[in-house]
Amino acid sequence: MITIALCDDNTQFACLLRQHLQRLCAYNIPNRVDISIAPTFSSADEVLEYLQSNTIDILFLDIDMPKTNGFELAKALCDAHPDTIIIFVSSSLI
């Protein structure tokens, strides 16, 4: 089982991304891997708390968040959970 999680302080963007991921995971592909989507997180602290008793295989992570930004969380995850794949996302427009 692969666990996917999202961390973004923009709840509207996180909800939209979650819906897209759920649709992708629902495809009936032969020999597909079982995937579960963990709760959506709005802060680095929530992710770290979740990881105390759970695992995350793939994390879609916002870069610009208050308190602890995505890069700081990624550094902590690389040290403590090196097998977690991090995909940076942002709803910010340049």
Image (cartoon, rainbow, N blue to C red):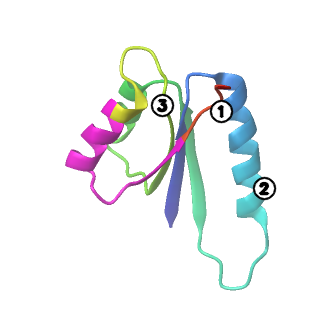
Question: Which residue is the site of mark 1?
Answer: 14
Q: Which mark is residue 63?
A: 3
Inter-mark Cα distance, 1 to 3: 13 Å
Question: Of the residues shown, which amino acid type is indicated by label 2?
Answer: Arg
Q: Secondary structure at mark 3?
A: loop
Q: Which residue is at 65% across, 29% downward?
A: 91
How would you rate the neighbour count of disc 2 (Cα within 10 Å): few for under 14, some for 14-19, many for 20 or more? few
Inter-mark Cα distance, 1 to 2: 14 Å
Q: Which mark is residue 28?
A: none
Q: Nearer the viewer, residue 74 or 23?
A: 74
Residue 16, compared with residue 21, is above or below; it is above
Q: Work out whether mark 1 precedes mark 3 in sequence or the reverse, and give the earlier one.
A: 1
Q: Position of residue 62 (x, y in %)?
A: 52, 33
Residue 8, compared with residue 28, is above or below; it is above
The magenta segment: 72-88
Q: Position of residue 92 (x, y in %)?
A: 64, 25
Judged from this view, the residue extending furthest toward the bottom is 31
Q: Work out whether mark 2 precedes mark 3 in sequence or the reverse, and give the earlier one.
A: 2
Res 31 quadrant in image: bottom right
Q: Which residue is at 68% across, 26% downward?
A: 93
Q: Which residue is at 53% across, 52% downward?
A: 4
Q: Nearer the viewer, residue 26 or 16?
A: 16
Inter-mark Cα distance, 2 to 3: 24 Å
Magenta stretch: includes residue 39: no
Q: Which residue is at 65% across, 78% downward?
A: 32
The reply to whether residue 52 is in sight is no
| 17 horizontally vs 8: left or right | right
